[in-house]
Amino acid sequence: MEAEKRLVAEFVAERGALHEDTVSQLIEAKCRYLGGAPDEWLPPQVSDVLYSIFPAKIMWEPDDLAEVPEAAAEFLRFLGNRFPTLADEYHAIADGVARSTTQFVAAMSDEDHWSFGKRMWTTAKAEGATLGDQASMDAWMEEFNQRPQAEREQVLGATALPPTTPGRRRPFPPVALPTDDELEQALTRVPFLYQ
């Protein structure tokens, strides 16, 4: 985590703070889900972060989606300057990422690629719940759990449980929120929830 913070600080010192939060989230996603050093990005990892991990896991305001490829390209150019022997490769990847805004926005908007959590929290937010507010989330979760199974499945997607009868799925169990302490601890590890 410290290496990630240092890298973001170096990026900001060289390139300015415009893309600081986005670059921080890109690095966090890469390190959390793909592993490796925060400043070592192979072309498949860039693709995985932008077109698999971000669409599945990261909530982002729709009007701000175009910023992500722009920030990623700027970060890759920064890495090219950091590693001169790889500069051509990083700059070529950056150019491709910069041209991929339409593809990125489409991937982020495709709900078929959203994780269970992203589906749930996006719906809660769209229905007026405040993600950092325990009372708001408790009230939304209580209401959500009372919905008919078919309506919950529209939000959560099809269950992996075997059907109880042909063509019929088992209902989802009620969802319980973690305690206040568990939520506070989780929020310190997931800063993008405040975006």
Image: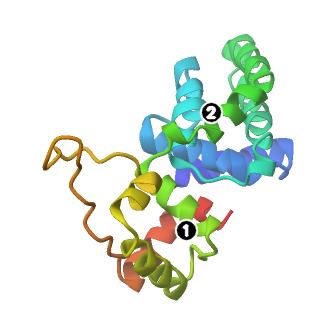
- Circle 2 residues within 10 Å: few <14, some 14–19, many ≥20: some
Residue at the location (23% across, 42% down)?
Answer: 167
The picture quadrant where one finds residue 171 is bottom left
Residue identifier under label 2: 107
Q: Position of residue 193 (x, y in %)?
A: 59, 64
Residue identifier under label 1: 124
Near-viewer residue (41 or 195): 195
Residue at the location (50% across, 38% down)?
Answer: 112
Judge from the rendering whether residue 112 lies leftward or rightward of residue 87; answer left or right.
Answer: left
Find numbered disc 1 in the image and state the secondary structure of the residue it sits on.
helix
Q: Position of residue 127 (x, y in %)?
A: 61, 70
Residue at the location (45% across, 34% down)?
Answer: 36
- Circle 1 residues within 10 Å: few <14, some 14–19, many ≥20: some
Give the residue type that dot 2 points to: Ala
Judge from the rendering whether residue 179 lies leftward or rightward of residue 57; answer left or right.
Answer: left
The picture quadrant where one finds residue 100 is top right
